[in-house]
Amino acid sequence: MSLTICKFCGERIRKVDNIYVDMTGGDCCCGTDNLENENEMHLPYAKLGSISHGTLRTEHLLDAFANHLLLLCGDNKEHKKIAEEAYEIVKNWDDSWDADKLQDIEELLWVDLFEALQEYAPPYSYFGSHIGDGSDYGFWICGETIEEAIRGGERLDPENVKTEEGYIIHVNERGNVTLYSSDNEDRVEIWSIV
């Protein structure tokens, strides 16, 4: 899936049925004429942050994960099938299902949906629960992998390191971290944290 960036608001947006929408499925706040060069700005990554918070009920997680997977998967038929299977389970949810049925559902949730969503995690991040809150699921930065990448990378100057994977990690004097793609001379921001 390829995304593009609105040049006015900076929001990551994607094309659905010839309409540009933000990652929640709503219209981009600036309309459809405010795009950077769509062919040059491809960010096949999820936006960092929460997609489900405050619940551990299986049917709620299935619904939230399936919604987000459909937003991210574009034309990936395998991922669409996983999401549709999750929707079907949520639609027919029955609290009286036996242990075998629930085990199959848990496998869909904790294996298939997790693995599919992890494919959209930006570099040096993961899909899962937040370290500080087990009921907050989303895409989160993994500090350990960033530290490893910085240690193993090539220092370009005091604030920039080129990783072995070819990314540029910029750490400013306040500790804010930004990850850039370095596929070409124009750096494209992948994510930034404060």
Image (spheres, grey):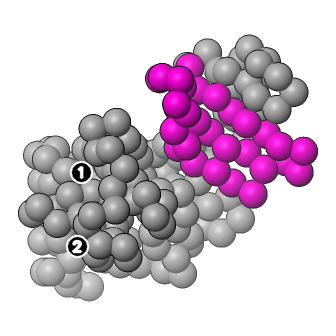
Where residue 143 appears, as percent x and y from the top left, is 72, 42
Query: For residue 47, which numbered disc appears in the image?
Result: none
Q: Residue at x 62, y 39 (%)?
A: 179
Q: Is 36 part of what is drawn in magenta?
A: no
Residue that numbered label 1 is attached to: 73
How far apart, in angstroms, are the residues tagged by discs 2 and 1? 31 Å
Which element is circle 2 on? loop
Q: Quadrant of the C terminus?
A: bottom right
**Where, by quadrant of the figure, is residue 84 drawn?**
bottom left
**Left or right, 135 with reference to 142:** left
Could you say which is closer to the camera, residue 153 or residue 183? 183
Residue sitting farthest toward the right: 173
**Left or right, 29 with reference to 71:** right
Where residue 51 appears, as percent x and y from the top left, is 45, 69
Q: Residue at x 21, y 77 (%)?
A: 90
Query: For residue 98, which numbered disc appears in the image?
Result: 2
Q: Residue at x 53, y 57 (%)?
A: 48
**Label 2 vs 1, first from the N-terminus:** 1
Residue sitting farthest toward the front: 33
Residue sitting farthest toward the bottom: 95
